[in-house]
Image (cartoon, rainbow, N blue to C red):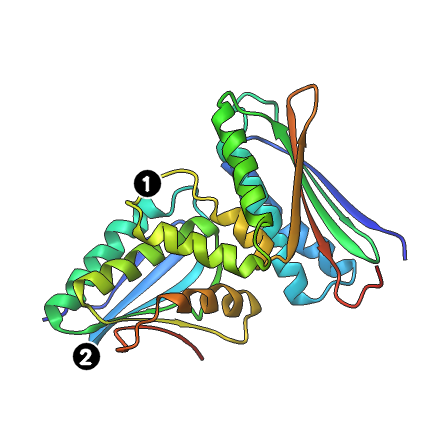
Amino acid sequence: MSGAPRRLVEGELVLEVRPGGDQVRVVWTGKSADREPGRFLVPVLSSLLGEARAAGARLVLDFSGLDYMNSSTFTPVVKILDEARRGAVPITLEYDQAKKWQALSFSALRTFETPDGSVVVAGR
Amino acid sequence: MEPSALELELPSDWSAVKAVWDPCRAMLRTAGLGEDEAYALAMVSQELLENAVKYGARDGGGIALSLRVAPADVVVEVRSRVGVDDEHLRTFDRTVQWIRGHQNPFEAYVERLKQLSVRPYAVGQSGLGLARIAYEGRCALDFYVDAASTLAVSAVYHREGAVP
């Protein structure tokens, strides 16, 4: 059973968690530019992955509305991709192809995609 | 066209990082760069500042950021006092050389992402910011340390369509 919709805020970063159906969707907005964003993101993303696993759902991280993320923010993101792959929890990263920085940064993350579709990095 | 320039004197704390985005982006747009180029170079400025704040001397008396736009290129330079930890400077040097050793900075960026994905999470130096500057910012990195122990790190972007 998935949890309720909720909003997590850290500095200028907002995560809207929308569980339901076959996915736990997390919509990222604002900016992630803290000195150590992993202090907030690592436990939050790990918990959301556990929530998706318990619900038998796909974890969808939607970055398309995000204005900026510093390089330190990518570390917790790639860590959760690895954790999802090892734990056999399906995960999708969505980004906005029309934003050049997102197209460049997130297309590089396609290296983590798996042939069975359990890890997907999708531009839209 | 006359070169355009922005010089900022900033404190050596995290407030410096937050303070550069808007003025850098505005200056770059005023100087005629496109929205995507201005965004990428503001990111480069912010990443260089993050490094200076995290690893420079805490009592170093501030950080200087210089942004120069010329017809052929854009140069971002950040100057800060070298931190007490020489190991950081050696790691920095190794990371810059490692990035230069790749024919395409995309390869360096992806390789560093893969390394980070399987490493236990640790607060601290990842080297991803420098690889991102080279790949996403399309900048060549260089640095020197002067006699006064000031580390000057520059990122040079060759403008699209510019004649070398």
10 Å crowding of disc 2: few (<14), some (14-19), many (20+): few
Residue at the image position 61 percent from the left and 46 percent from the top: B20
Looking at this rendering, what residue extends furthest in the right direction?
B1
Q: Residues within 10 Å of mark 1 (few under 14, many from 20)?
A: few
Give me the residue at 37% from left, 50% from top: B116
* Residue wearing tag 1: B122
Between the C-alphas of marks 2 and 1, the distance is: 32 Å
Q: Is residue B63 visible?
A: no
Q: Is residue A66 left or right of residue A51?
A: right
**Residue that appears at 66% across and 37% down:** B143
**Which one is in front, B95 or B63?**
B95
Kindly indicate whether the residues beneath marks 2 and 1 are on one polypeptide chain: no
Q: Nearer the viewer, mark 2 or mark 1?
A: 1
Identify the secondary structure beneath mark 2.
loop
Of the pair A80 and A19, the residue shown nearer to us: A80
Chain containing mark 1: B
Quadrant containing the C terminus of chain A is bottom left
- Asked if residue A45 shows in the view, the reply is yes
Q: Which residue is mark 2?
A: A22
Tell me if label 2 and label 1 are in contact, CB under 8 Å: no
Q: Is residue B115 above or below residue A82?
A: above
Position in image of residue A81 (x %, y %):
30, 62
Q: Is residue B134 above or below residue B93?
A: below
Q: In terms of depth relative to the viewer, which is nearer, A36 or B132?
A: B132
- The chain identifier of the residue carrying mark 2 reads A
Q: Position of residue B21 (x, y in %)?
A: 60, 50
Residue depicted at x 30% and y 45%: B121
From the top left corner, tell me how far across and down residue A27 is, in percent: 35, 68
